[in-house]
Amino acid sequence: MNDSLFTIFMNAAVVSNFVLAMFLGICPFLGVSNKVDTSLNMGMATTFVMLVSSAAAYAINLILGELGIEFLRLICYIAVIASSVQLVEMVVKKFSPALFQALGIFLPLITTNCAILGLTLFQTSREYNFVQSLVFALGAGAGFTLALLLMAGIREKLELAKTPDIAQGAAMTLMIGGVLSLAFMGFAGLA
């Protein structure tokens, strides 16, 4: 790939935002975005898992390619992602029990976050080198965190606003997500 590292980062973070443009990782986007601080922590945990998974996926891809068994790529990626999440869960539980409680069920659900699996598959199909893969993962994590923070900030502000009963709760969350998605899809012309 001839893309610069800045282009790869911005493409993953903004132009092709995993949540708002590619619709990957919607579950934590809708479920954890009630509070800004919880969203930030979830975004950082997901970004860490993305970085670890990206580095491991690059190595796995090289090994499987050398052995001629690329068909095992998907299952290996899933195993690496699950292991990375377990590592994050143990660290968060040990160093921040309050955060562990706040993230609740969504922390183990990072394992099934399709944004992380998508990241590993996209970097492989785009044939990124190791540095490009890490920059791509960092950009994807930053974009995921940005989406969570934008949603959480808007939802916190709306708690103070008078909204019609019919538009409260899940309906409002989905409307906000749709408007944010439209806004981010406007960035596609900038690439």
Image (cartoon, rainbow, N blue to C red):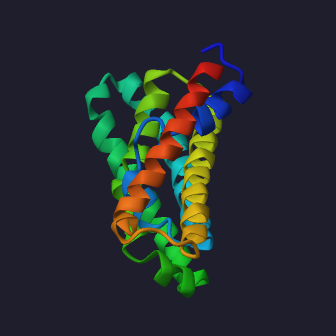
Q: Position of residue 38 (x, y in %)?
A: 56, 72
Q: Position of residue 104 (x, y in %)?
A: 41, 78
Please tell me which residue is depicted at 52% across the width and 49% down the height of the picture: 50
Q: Nearer the viewer, residue 42 or 77?
A: 42
Q: Nearer the viewer, residue 168 or 56?
A: 168
Q: Nearer the viewer, residue 17 or 124?
A: 17
Quarter containing the N terminus = top right
Q: In the rendered image, which quarter is residue 74 located in?
A: top left
Figure check: 110 above or below 71 = below
Q: Position of residue 24 (x, y in %)?
A: 40, 43
Q: Position of residue 9 (x, y in %)?
A: 66, 34
Q: How many marks?
A: 0
Q: Is residue 172 left or right of residue 68?
A: right
Figure check: 78 above or below 96 = above
Q: Is residue 126 left or right of residue 6?
A: left
Q: In the rendered image, which quarter is residue 169 located in?
A: bottom left
